[in-house]
Amino acid sequence: MKPAGISVVIPTHPGRSWDLLGRAVRSVYEQTLRPDEIILAVDNNKRGAGATRQQGLERAGFTHTAFLDSDDEFLPMHLDTLYTVMVDDPDIIIAFTWFTAVGMPDPLGHFGLPFDPQFPYHSTVTTMVRTDVALECGGFPTAGEGSTPGCLNDDFVFELRMCGVATSQNKKIVHIPARTWKYHGHGGNTSGRSSHGDAR
């Protein structure tokens, strides 16, 4: 059994600029609730976003895992907001807030919409999950699985797997209507292509 606490997984790839990755890592260190560990999962073998996220998830040593793409950033209350809600209700297996879009409009438009695991919408991968449940449901798909040949929607496939657990075991997936991170559009977004390790 994993000890109580937070692992943060940041998938990245060798081509990611230090300016972007450094910004992501700094945003984790600036949290009002510091995580117990930060895991940089590097896609050295060009396996894609899903496999790289899964690599980080499998290394997570604590009960709760939060994901952050290496070109995005947390705002200071991000982890505190999610962890407080999940600890208060052990039936929650995923909690997610929303983002402020930078350099682009909101591509999803679901801010504030309650989440029903029986009728899911595409949220984002910047979530906090119960580590044990995420591993037990199969985690993230690897390249070749999922809704496209290149597995560009690995985050949504993972979400659907967790929805299956929530539905069958009467667990919860919760959207907290707060903007606690920044989603950057910068022209170099990789969208999970197999030549890169982090999506969007």
Image (cartoon, rainbow, N blue to C red):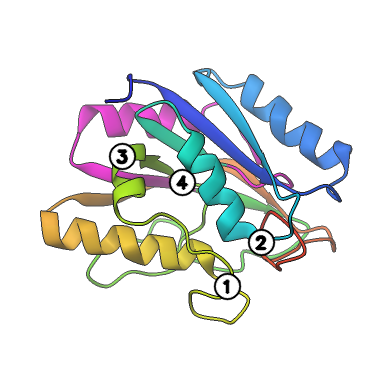
Task: Tell me how far mark 3 sits from mark 2, CA to CA.
Answer: 23 Å
- Is disc 1 in contact with disc 3, using a CB cutoff of under 8 Å? no
Residue range highlighted in magenta = 68-97
Amino acid under disc 2:
Gly
* Residue 136 horizontal/vertical position (percent): 29, 49
Q: Secondary structure at mark 4?
A: loop
- Read off the residue under disc 1: 151
- Is disc 2 in contact with disc 1, using a CB cutoff of under 8 Å? yes
Task: Tell me how far mark 4 sits from mark 3, CA to CA.
Answer: 15 Å
Task: Tell me how far mark 1 sits from mark 4, CA to CA.
Answer: 19 Å
- Read off the residue under disc 4: 127
* Residue 168 horizontal/vertical position (percent): 13, 61
Q: Is residue 75 left or right of residue 95?
A: right
Q: Is residue 85 left or right of residue 13?
A: left
- Is disc 3 in contact with disc 2, using a CB cutoff of under 8 Å? no
Point out which mark residue 48 bears.
Answer: 2
Q: Report whether residue 158 is seen.
A: yes
- Read off the residue under disc 3: 132
Residue lying at 51% horizontally and 57% vertically, measured from the top left: 124
